[in-house]
Image (spheres, rainbow, N blue to C red):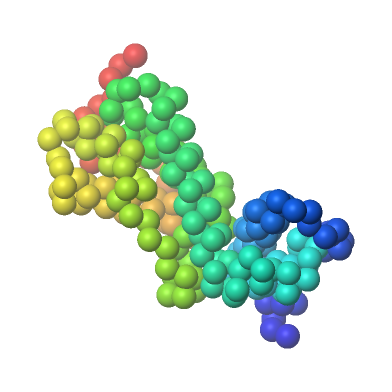
Amino acid sequence: MTAADRVDVPAVGRRRRARRGEGDRLRGEIVEAAGRLLAETGDAHAVTLRAVARAVGVTATSIYLHFPDRANLVRALRRQCFAELVAAMDTAADAVGAEPHARARARAHAYVRFGLENSGRYGALFEPALQSSTPVDIGQSTVRGTVRDVTAALGGNVEGAEAWLVLVQFWTALHGTVALRSVRPGFGWPEVDRQVDDLVDRLTGRRAATP
């Protein structure tokens, strides 16, 4: 038994046998349990099939029906975490209306908020121990809304490879904000909303429209 398998994860008791059609729900519960385990421990190595099975209340062999190995489970977890992040950004952008710069700001705020408030789930996207064995293809199509809003905030004249470069710069800056604030909380950071607004303004060279 590894150290990761000895993580103190509360068992929820033995589950009843799943009825027909409940397999997808169990799969979702397994992924959710893996996410909670990562958030609680902050340790990617703690996400083992044995520990997740204990948290869900099933046998480790039951998990194999949905995930043949740990790598497949972690890949599913990372995909879900990324989907949650993208959904948070999309929702925030839609809430502020159609003005591109305001939407770009809203996406940036949602990204940083998600990263700071969900350190375990956010960490699943970038944890080095999970990268090599469980690659997840983000893909430009997945973040098309962010590409559209950020490039529109630049005047809408940026396309193709240049648009992707703008998004990379946007992402690099936001990830750096989350990462540095997480590891150096005692640094004299400016108020986070002001920092994010300033970041987007400098990247786009514009100011948000006044309501």
Between residues 130 and 188, which one lies in front from this camera angle? 130
Q: Residue drawn at (60%, 73%), measured in percent from left and top?
A: 68
Residue 182 visible in the current orientation: no
* Residue ID at (51%, 59%): 78
In this view of the protein, which residue sits in the foreground, 206 or 91?
91
Determine whether, in the image, residue 204 is placed left or right of residue 134.
left
Residue 20 at what x, y percent from top left? 75, 53
Judged from this view, the residue extending furthest toward the front is 20
Occupied quadrant, residue 63: bottom right
- Quadrant location of the N terminus in the rendered image: bottom right
Residue at point 22%, 50% (across, down) = 164
Residue that extends furthest to the top in the rendered view of this protein:
211
Q: Residue at x 44, y 57 (%)?
A: 179
| Residue 195 position within the rendered picture, expressed as x and y whole percent measured from the top left | 37, 39
Q: Is residue 43 left or right of residue 141?
A: right
Say if residue 211 shows up in the picture.
Answer: yes
Q: Position of residue 191 (x, y in %)?
A: 44, 38
Q: Quadrant of the C terminus?
A: top left
Between 211 and 181, the one nearer to me in the picture:
211
**Where is residue 80 shown, x and y percent of the image?**
53, 53
Residue 130 appears left or right of 163: right
- When the figure is inspected, residue 100 is found, relative to residue 17, above or below; the finding is above
Q: Nearer the viewer, residue 34 or 198?
A: 34
